[in-house]
Image: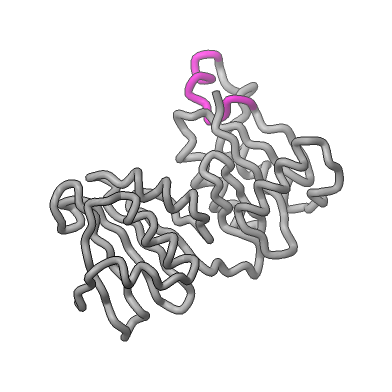
Amino acid sequence: MSFDLYVWHESEPINAQLAQAKLDRWQAGEPGLFPAHPAVPTLLAALLDRFPPLESLSDADADQGAWSMTPDPDDAVLTLPCAWSRADEVRQEVTRLAAEHGLVCYDPQRRVLDPGAPGHVAVFTLATHGLPTVADPDDARLDQTVRRLSPERFYTILEWTDGWFAQVGHGPSAGVAAGTYALEFREGADGAHLHTTSTDVTEAVRFLQDVRAGRDTWRQRHVWEQW
């Protein structure tokens, strides 16, 4: 089983939802979705220099290779089937090279688009301890992230471009009791900094979802302390 990444060029801003829809249409056979770009084969050459093709490895070394299958060359879109044991290492290098060459890297397993098309500025970013930053997370991503908080991955923070943020922390590592969620909201660098707690994971999820959607109902559902 492999961990697949996809790389292509975008001339217009794109988010993860649009990238997934575009990939679905391409995999269904729709032509013309990914125009050729010279940076695409250039990136593949650099990547195969860093992570050699399976065919160049000995039988003994192939099991430790970065690929589950050697990527096929293409001048429009690359499918990169990574070995699960080296997925994090390969993803970091692909993301770096994509940014260097002005390409996008899409991870359909996590539905994360990184680094994004030239000129694209995410309205929101979701940063979670121990995980890559996600641009413009949807409700499903917020739900999944909060429910998977743990002692090792104990907070997630939703920030937007004007410096405001909402944060959910979990358990003693976040300064609250086990099984408790710390909810924080900051109105920019010089604005109010509000804090409360909840033992309800659904409420912690709803807090981030409401903030992202611009709903103020979260303010009325809790008693907030000013920090």
Residue at the (42%, 67%) spot, across then down: 211
Q: Which residues are magenta?
A: 59-69
Q: Is residue 51 above or below residue 205?
A: above
Q: Quadrant for residue 4, please give it.
A: top right
Q: Is residue 49 above or below residue 172?
A: above
Residue at the (41%, 77%) spot, across then down: 163
Q: Please identify the quadrant where the C terminus is shown.
A: bottom left
Magenta stretch encompasses residue 66: yes
Magenta stretch encompasses residue 110: no
Position of residue 10 in the picture relative to residue 188 (left or right): right
Residue 79 placed where, x, y %?
67, 37
Residue 190 placed where, x, y %?
31, 86
187 and 105: which one is in front?
A: 187
The kind of secondary structure the magenta stretch mainly shows is loop
Position of residue 52 in the picture relative to residue 222 (left or right): right
Position of residue 22 in the picture relative to residue 47 (left or right): right
93 and 14: which one is in front?
A: 14
Residue 220 placed where, x, y %?
32, 71
Which residue is at the far right? 31
165 and 118: which one is in front?
A: 165
